[in-house]
């Protein structure tokens, strides 16, 4: 409520009709989720589990225990190996410069 009011939207409760969010219990929980708490004051409110999040979860389930799962794990590990180490990132950049390639950060 404070955020809406800080943005100058005083009648947000009259304007809000739906909310789209990921399916985490903190957001869509039946009793204590954000949507449930707001619905207690605004019974017309519709809470929607975000289609993109649902699609991501479906793809993750579909590719579980396949080579895609292994590739995803490898790429995630590579990302964190360079993301968390400025020295390693500098070394990777030096190698990319030598090969005339770009490093996307």
Image (tube, grey):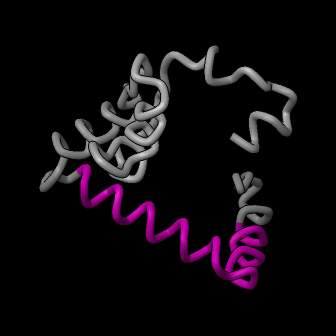
Quadrant in which residue 35 is drawn: top left
Q: Which residue is drawn at 85% across and 33% down?
A: 7
**Quick check: 25 above or below 78?**
above
Give the farthest residue toward the left: 65
Quadrant in which residue 63 is drawn: top left
Horizontal and vertical percent for residue 33? 39, 47
Horizontal and vertical percent for residue 53? 38, 36
Q: Residue at x 75, y 34 (%)?
A: 4
Q: Which residue is drawn at 80% across and 25% down?
A: 9
Q: Which residue is drawn at 34% across and 38% down?
A: 56
Horizontal and vertical percent for residue 29? 31, 46
Quadrant in which residue 98 is drawn: bottom right
- Front residue of 33/68: it is 33
Q: In which quarter of the image is the C terminus?
A: bottom right
Left or right, 97 with respect to 70, comes to right
Left or right, 46 with respect to 17, comes to left
**Quick check: 38 above or below 84?**
above
Horizontal and vertical percent for residue 51? 37, 25
State which region is magenta. 68-95
- Front residue of 32/70: it is 32
Labels in figure, total = 0
- The verdict on residue 3 being magenta is no
């Amino acid at each position: 409520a404070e955020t809406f009011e800080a943005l100058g939207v005083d009648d947000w409760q009259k304007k809000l009709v739906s909310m789209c969010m990921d399916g985490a219990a903190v957001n869509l929980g039946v009793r204590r989720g954000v949507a449930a708490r707001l619905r207690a004051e605004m019974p017309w409110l519709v809470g929607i589990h975000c289609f993109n999040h649902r699609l991501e979860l479906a793809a993750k389930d579909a590719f579980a225990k396949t080579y895609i799962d292994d590739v995803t794990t490898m790429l995630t590990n590579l990302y964190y190996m360079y993301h968390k180490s400025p020295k390693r990132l500098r070394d990777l950049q030096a190698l990319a410069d030598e090969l005339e390639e770009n490093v996307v950060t």
